[in-house]
Structures are given as structure tokens and as C-alpha cells.
Image (cartoon, rainbow, N blue to C red):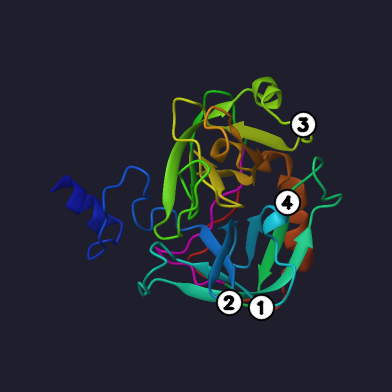
């Protein structure tokens, strides 16, 4: 009964939740965006305003025809909650080659309609600290060294890991950057093979996946772009590139 009441409060009555420990409660991550071209799953990103999505550099569209799908959970069916919006503009943080930065902003061709299934996530008001328990979400494989066909949105609980320990697990060809934050440990599920997978801590956006190290060795933390370092740049991009003649949605959540 308590679960039914919770689902009703979230507007999820009628949805089927498998109860899989790695599956997100349907539509509990209304900021999650799927970036795809021609129907195939490419990457994830996070909606931060009705016009903008942030994702990793490797996930940014390199050609026209990329669509952002919002309000998704089960990729195998149209649930009636989706909004499919083409990408109009891509802004990369520069210099944007690893190991310096991995962050891109995608402007939608029209504003997302904000509702219970599609909502932006606030930018971080502070940086995450080692030991903080966060959530990472995406549609990629959760089985190390194995491909899984994308289906239901997955959520993993992961701890933020100390920078020095994380750096010590890097292969020789990857170097540490102050723009990185790491999460995951050998005692938790630590594989989500979805570029741009979203790291959320206490309701705030703290990262987008940079390297999915936990999918190659479950004892290694995965690496995320440390979004708290980029608040100023993100807001400057939105101020400069967002279309001027817009009518804000009455449901838009202010960013922190």
C-alpha cells in the first residue's frame, strides 16, 4: 500500500516497475536525457533548463540529426511521457581534449515542456566530498565487460571516492585533471556503460560520465566531469546563447 501511494504521488500509477535493484523507479529521474541518432542509443545527458542539456565531450553530436528524448524510462515502448526534440547547437568547453576538460552543452531547437516527467536538475551549490553517497543513472550495460541491449533506465548508488585513490587506479595513458570527480567502489555496483551517465548527489547535478572504468575492473571507480567547477561557464553559455524571444514555462525550476 505504501508503494502504491508513493507511485500515485509521483504520477506513476499504471507504470510497471520490475523491482530490479538496478532499475530506476520509473520517471524518478525527470532530468535524464537520451541522445540518439536514427533511433539508436548513443549517450545520456542532463536537462538543466528548458533549453539546455549538459553531457560529456565524447557524447556531443558531431553531425546533424541528433535528437534528445526526455521523459524516457523504457526504451522498448512509447509511454506517452516522452518529448523528442532535435539539437540545434553544440557548445564545447575549450580546451576540450582529455585530460583537461570533458563537457559540452546542447541547446534544444525548442524549449522542453516542463512537467512531472520532464524537469531540469539544479546545478551544484557545492562540490561533492569523499564518502558522499550519490546516484548514477543511464541506459547502458551494468555487467562488466559485457554488452547489454539498452532497455530500462538504470540507477546505481555509488560513493564519492578520494581523488588520490582514484588517480592511482588510472591506466598509464590517462592523466588526472582537477575537472574530474570519481565514484564507485568494489563493494558497490560500479559499472554503467553509458557515456554521459548522470551523477546526482542530494538532488543536484554533480557529474556526467567521462570514463567508465568500473566496467573494465569493478574495483576501480568511474570518472565524471566535476560539474561544481563549471557553474560559471555553464551560466555564461546559457546567458549568451539561449534564444532571446522565449516565453518561460511557468513550471521551470530555478537553477542554483
Which of marks 2 and 1 precedes in the sequence?
A: 2
Q: How far across and down, in percent of the image, does residue 140 sit?
A: 50, 53
> Which residue is situated farthest in the front direction here?
146
Please tell me whether residue 116 belongs to the stretch shown in magenta. Answer: yes
Q: How many marks?
A: 4
Q: Is residue 251 visible?
A: yes
Along the viewing direction, whichever of 158 and 187 lies nearer the viewer: 187
Residue receiving disc 4: 103
Answer with the quarter of the image where residue 79 lies. bottom left
- Mark 4, Cα crowd under 10 Å, few <14 / some 14-19 / many 20+, is many
Tell me the mark number nearer the camera, choosing from 2 and 4: 2
Front position in the image: 26 or 186: 186
Residue wearing tag 1: 65
Q: Residue at x 49, y 47 (%)?
A: 146
Comparing labels 3 and 4, the label whose residue is closer to the camera: 3
Q: Is 62 situated above or below 233?
A: below
Where is residue 129? Give x, y as percent. Answer: 59, 26
First in residue order: circle 4 vs circle 1: 1
In the image, the segment drawn in magenta is: 112-125
Q: Which residue is mark 3?
A: 176
Whether label 1 touches label 2, CB < 8 Å? yes
- Disc 3 from disc 2: Cα separation: 35 Å
Amino acid at each position: 500500500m505504501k508503494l502504491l501511494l508513493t507511485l500515485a504521488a509521483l504520477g506513476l500509477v499504471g507504470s510497471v516497475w520490475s523491482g530490479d535493484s538496478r532499475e530506476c523507479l520509473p520517471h524518478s529521474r525527470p532530468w535524464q536525457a537520451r541522445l540518439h541518432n536514427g533511433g539508436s542509443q548513443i549517450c545520456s545527458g542532463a536537462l538543466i533548463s528548458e533549453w539546455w542539456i549538459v553531457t560529456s565531450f565524447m557524447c556531443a553530436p558531431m553531425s546533424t540529426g541528433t535528437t534528445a528524448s526526455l521523459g524516457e524510462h523504457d526504451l522498448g515502448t512509447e509511454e506517452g511521457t516522452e518529448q523528442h526534440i532535435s539539437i540545434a547547437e553544440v557548445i564545447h568547453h575549450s580546451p576540450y581534449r582529455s585530460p583537461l576538460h570533458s563537457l559540452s552543452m546542447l541547446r534544444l531547437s525548442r524549449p522542453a515542456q516542463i512537467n512531472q516527467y520532464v524537469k531540469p536538475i539544479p546545478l551544484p551549490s557545492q562540490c561533492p566530498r569523499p564518502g558522499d553517497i550519490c546516484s548514477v543513472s543511464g541506459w547502458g550495460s551494468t555487467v562488466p565487460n559485457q554488452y547489454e541491449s539498452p532497455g530500462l533506465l538504470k540507477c546505481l548508488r555509488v560513493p564519492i571516492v578520494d581523488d588520490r585513490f582514484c588517480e592511482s587506479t588510472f591506466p598509464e595513458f590517462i592523466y588526472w585533471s582537477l575537472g574530474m570527480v570519481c565514484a564507485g567502489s568494489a563493494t558497490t555496483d560500479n559499472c554503467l556503460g553509458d557515456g554521459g551517465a548522470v551523477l546526482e548527489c542530494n538532488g543536484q547535478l554533480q557529474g556526467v560520465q567521462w570514463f567508465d572504468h568500473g566496467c573494465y575492473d569493478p574495483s576501480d571507480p568511474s570518472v565524471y566531469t566535476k560539474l561544481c567547477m563549471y557553474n560559471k561557464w555553464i551560466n555564461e553559455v546559457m546567458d549568451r546563447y539561449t534564444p532571446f524571444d522565449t516565453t518561460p514555462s511557468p513550471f521551470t525550476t530555478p537553477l542554483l
